[in-house]
Amino acid sequence: MMTVLPFQKTGVVVFLGGMLLVGNSVAAGLDLQNGAEVYGETCVACHGENGKGEIPGVPDFTSKDGPLSKSDEILIRNVTNGFISPGAVMEMPALGGNPDLTQQDVKDVIAYLRKTFQK
């Protein structure tokens, strides 16, 4: 059983007991380099290098109340199954349109997003 610690909700990154805690997620076994590669190959066309979105309605990863304010569980589900944001002109397809992505790739890219864009 995992205990949720107060700092897990603050966006603070802490190394505790051999596990990296990032925001509200446990990042044990995540590969940020892979996450960066997945983002650069699959996500950047719509979400942009700065994470603010290149297409109207694409959510801003840098916004305090943006997608990264959601739990990893919700983000994993949205990336895996596809998602349409309010005001978006198109839906993000399942796996960002890349059927070769694995669940580990999805987890890695979410960890990368949190490290790179979450304030």
Image (cartoon, rainbow, N blue to C red):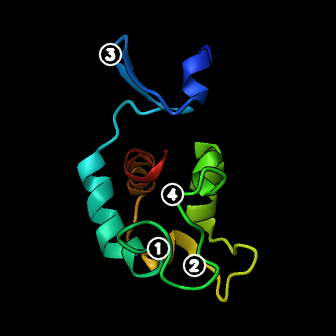
At horizontal 41% and vertical 72% (from top left) the residue drawn is 43
User: What secondary structure is marked by label 1?
Assistant: helix
Residue that mark 3 sits on? 18
Residue that protrudes farthest toward the bottom in the picture: 89
At horizontal 39% and vertical 21% (from top left) the residue drawn is 14
Q: Any mark on residue 62, and which?
A: 4
Residue that mark 2 sits on? 93
Who is closer to the viewer here, 82 or 69? Answer: 69
Against 41, is 74 above or below? above
Amino acid type at image mark 3: Gly
Residue that mark 1 sits on? 47
The answer to whether residue 99 shows anywhere in this view is yes
Residue that protrudes farthest toward the top in the picture: 17
Closest to the camera, between mark 3 and mark 4, is: 4
Q: Position of residue 57 (x, y in %)?
A: 64, 79
Q: Position of residue 94 (x, y in %)?
A: 57, 73
